[in-house]
Amino acid sequence: MNDAVTKWSDKLDAFHIGLVCGVLGIIPQEIDDIYTNPGRGINNDTFVIAAKGQTYLYRLPGKGTELFCDRDREYDAYMRLKEYAITDELVYFEPRLGIKMSVYYPNSHVTDVTDDEELRLSTELIRRFHNLPVEFPVIDTPYMRLGRYHKIAEESAGKEHYPEGFESFLQEVLDFQPTLDRFSQKLCPCHGDCLPNNVLFPCGKPAPILIDFEFPAMSDPYGDLAAFCHDGELKEEACLRCLDFYLGRPAGDLERFKLFGYIAVVAAMWCCWSSYKAAVEKNVEFYDGYSLMSYRYAKFGLELAREFLPGAEKELG
């Protein structure tokens, strides 16, 4: 028994091996393999566990995630969405520790942002999710999150990892809120972390699914679209194609304005988050790089939002 536990100690300690065995109703000797999830994960540590012919994904929360994520909200979201078969399949969830175990889909892949067909399927999935008759118990808009994330970074050494010029630019984004709020729309269920890496195309299934509901809330749907574009580092033309796919028709200037306005907000928010992570995690170079990318993308979004603003105002009347 001890040898079987020790075998995996470079991945999971005895507590987690025991938990996995308890959930699956097996003994450590029946674990065939444990390896780090090959997909990119920047907020948590995840492992693939193979046992008795099945594979599972085992998630451990990253450092400081409790400052940003409410695991009770995450579990609640999975329960509310269960009947719609639009998410990954939970096997075990422990809100207090943030441990999640779900079905792993071998030979699957996340959205390829260079493939227009996958962009179309991904954004149509996001629209379908936004239109579900589901109401999450919390309202949490991109500006509300930006305010919190900025405060967390300011109160830690994260501020030292801000890219040069970010603090003055952040004020521009905050000052832009009254303008963006004029074009706000009815809130809907939102993912909150709708990255290309959180849209999964499971092998053998007819449509993609959404995974990792760590930030669910009622919010503006353009925040999810903005997160998708930001993390995929999509260029203007690709952003506009995604917007057209999402709407099911060519977008107008008002809709284009909203997308790029929320790109500025969401990218600035993740810049604050990544600056905090750079201060507390070992992989400083990665998080500093992500912070700089986010800052640059936020500037890209705000510049384009300002270009589309006159047309948006005409459409608004």
Image (spheres, rainbow, N blue to C red):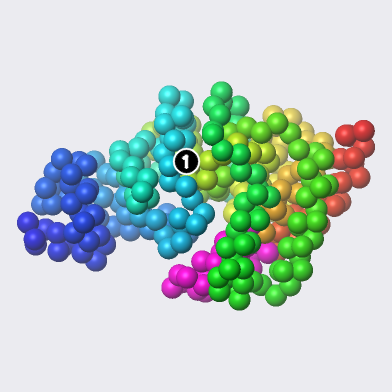
Quickly name the residue at label 1. Answer: 73
Highlighted range, magenta: 269-295
Q: Position of residue 167 (x, y in %)?
A: 72, 69
User: Which residue lies at the image location 52% right of the left edge and 54% below the top edge?
Assistant: 68
Q: Where, quadrant-wise, is the C terminus in this rendering?
A: top right
Residue at image location 80% in from the left, 53% down from the top: 176
Q: In terms of secondary structure, what is the magenta stretch mainly?
A: helix
Residue 265, image x and y in percent?
A: 70, 53
Residue at 77% from the left image edge and 68% from the top image edge = 168
What is the x, y in percent for residue 183? 80, 39
Placement of 137 over or under 142, stated as above or below: above
Question: Is 238 positioned to the left or the right of 278 in the image?
Answer: right
Q: Nearer the viewer, residue 2 or 218?
A: 218
State whether residue 128 appears in this view.
no
Q: Secondary structure at mark 1?
A: helix
Res 172 → quadrant: bottom right
**Residue at image coords 47%, 41%:** 73
